[in-house]
């Protein structure tokens, strides 16, 4: 299919680059939701729904959720055994096998926008990677990335994934001391066609307020106060706000992510992406590769004051309140839709973003809306469980814990693969699940070059699922978190 996608699938500017003068599109896709008042506990899991959330005022009530499969546990990891016993070495990234040629770290998009100055900026430092297997049979992989700014062969501030104890539980501690690093868990093999993946988040410190302020522990919104913190060399595009759009500018003159009207920190609680063996990369690459996700988007107060934080749902009253009135420790539960196939000069390729909350009755809305707020001050004695399921009809996103304003709850939203001609991006893990109707060509006609990438979702294609937990981005996000009990379930076989 080569026609222009429907307007409801057109991507707005990325969340990382607010466009204050652009009218935000708003649409609702019917899906199912249930907001439970008791969290699920799973041995052999049965994630069936509970009471149905009320629909939004003037909206359509969400349909009854499909019956979930009966699950059986396949893998479980509590990090009681020593991580990385072989002490994996850092290796220099050569990009000999890029994930794609679009917006991977050395993707063509950046040169075509910025020109030779971007090439010089990109080549001014080196990137190093490290990975090691975790769990029974090595079913998990820990993947880390670090930057060597002066090319002396050493990572500047090494991110790490190590053993620890929080709240009496053994945990994996993810530490990313600088925004140029990344640290994630992923499955070593592609996920099966149907599955449930879950884990417990024990602590998190990637920004947001503590005791009413973002300035705590000698940090600003989770970032250390030393030096500059910018998106160099992967800016939001030469035509984006917050800087001059000149790739020859020194590091400190690129878009500031620590402070100001474009500042933000964040964390991926749990995401599903469309390829195997994911590893930390620049943030724009991920905007084109995610299917469904739950993340935290902790913006600076200056950005929130300009409307850059969106709104938050009170799931007890099913009413929204302004992000400015929150602690900024929000949980977004959302899907990626179709991309903007022709972004225009100085822009970026990125997908439309659709957010699900109890306030919408579970309908996915193309408006930044958080489903809940975490309470980091309660952690690690209280924790949060995040889970994603894939069945034969679609994806289910689930978050459980003691949320601000509403108390102990499980928020659970199911979204079919396609609703009202709005698909979940690259939802098909096998060719037979998709007929090619959303195929198109990605087109870039930019300041320093042009390119086309045809057949971005053709008939006969398939996109395996992988989950990602942690800090995916190597030009934004900084902090630490701890987690435990990563579990993978598959459907019970019928006797």
Image: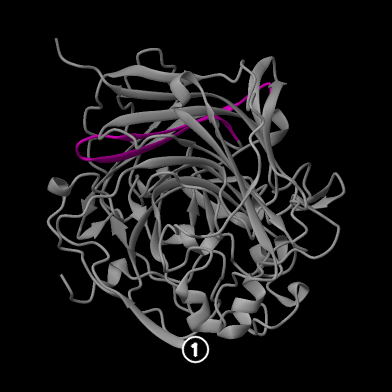
**Residue 118 or 26: which is nearer the viewer?**
118
Does the magenta portion include 12?
A: no
Does the magenta portion include 393?
A: yes
Name the residue: 18% across, 74% down: 2
Task: Identify the residue under disc 1.
Answer: 448
Name the residue: 56% across, 77% down: 20
Q: Which residues are magenta?
A: 380-403
Question: Could you tell me residue 135's position as x and y percent?
Answer: 51, 22
Question: Could you tell me residue 260's position as x and y percent?
Answer: 73, 68
| Left or right: 483 as drawn, with respect to 2 | right
**Residue 110 or 423: which is nearer the viewer?**
110
Question: Could you tell me residue 462's position as x and y percent?
Answer: 23, 50
Task: Identify the image quadrant of the N terminus.
Answer: bottom left
Chief secondary structure of the magenta portion: strand
Quarter of the rendering containing residue 89? top right
Question: Could you tell me residue 464's position as x and y percent?
Answer: 30, 44
In the image, residue 11 sits, relative to residue 466, either above or below, namely below
């Amino acid at each position: 299919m080569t026609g222009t996608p429907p307007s409801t699938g057109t991507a707005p500017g990325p969340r990382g680059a607010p466009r204050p003068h652009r009218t935000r599109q708003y649409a609702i896709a019917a899906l199912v939701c249930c907001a439970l008042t008791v969290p699920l506990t799973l041995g052999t899991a049965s994630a069936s729904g509970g009471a149905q959330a009320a629909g939004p005022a003037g909206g359509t009530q969400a349909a009854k959720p499909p019956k979930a499969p009966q699950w059986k546990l396949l893998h479980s990891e509590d990090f009681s055994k020593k991580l990385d016993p072989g002490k994996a070495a850092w290796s220099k990234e050569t990009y000999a096998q890029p994930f794609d040629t679009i917006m991977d770290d050395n993707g063509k998009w950046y040169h075509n926008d910025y020109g030779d100055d971007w090439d010089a900026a990109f080549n001014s430092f080196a990137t190093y990677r490290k990975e090691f297997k975790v769990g029974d049979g090595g079913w998990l992989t820990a993947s880390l990335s670090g930057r060597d700014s002066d090319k002396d062969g050493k990572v500047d501030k090494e991110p790490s994934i190590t053993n620890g104890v929080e709240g009496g539980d053994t945990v994996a501690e993810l530490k990313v001391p600088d925004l140029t690093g990344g640290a994630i868990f992923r499955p070593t093999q592609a996920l099966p066609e149907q599955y449930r993946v879950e884990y417990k988040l024990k602590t998190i410190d990637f920004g947001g307020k503590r005791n009413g302020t973002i300035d705590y522990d000698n940090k600003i919104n989770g970032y250390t106060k030393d030096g500059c913190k910018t998106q160099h060399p992967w800016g939001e595009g030469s035509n984006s706000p917050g800087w001059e759009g000149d790739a020859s500018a020194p590091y400190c003159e690129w878009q500031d992510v620590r402070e100001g009207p474009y500042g933000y920190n964040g964390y991926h609680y749990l995401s599903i992406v469309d390829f195997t063996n994911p590893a930390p990369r620049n943030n724009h690459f991920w905007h084109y590769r995610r299917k469904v996700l739950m993340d935290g988007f902790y913006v600076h107060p200056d950005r929130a004051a300009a409307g850059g934080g969106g709104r938050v749902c009170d799931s007890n009253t099913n009413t929204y309140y302004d992000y400015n009135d929150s602690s900024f420790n929000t949980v977004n539960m959302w899907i990626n839709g179709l991309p903007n196939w022709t972004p225009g000069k100085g822009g970026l390729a990125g997908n439309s973003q659709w957010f699900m909350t109890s306030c919408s009755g579970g309908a996915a809305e193309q408006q930044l809306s958080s489903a809940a707020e975490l309470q980091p001050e309660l952690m690690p004695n209280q924790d949060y469980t995040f889970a994603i399921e894939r069945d034969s009809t679609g994806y289910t996103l689930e978050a459980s814990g003691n949320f601000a304003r509403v108390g102990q709850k499980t928020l659970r939203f199911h979204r079919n693969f396609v609703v009202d001609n709005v698909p979940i991006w690259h939802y098909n893990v096998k060719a037979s699940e998709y007929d090619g109707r959303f195929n198109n060509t990605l087109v870039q006609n930019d300041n320093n070059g042009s390119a086309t990438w045809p057949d971005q979702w053709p008939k006969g294609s398939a996109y395996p699922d992988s989950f990602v937990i942690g800090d995916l981005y190597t030009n934004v996000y900084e902090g630490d978190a701890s987690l435990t009990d990563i579990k993978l379930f598959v459907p019970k076989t019928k006797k």
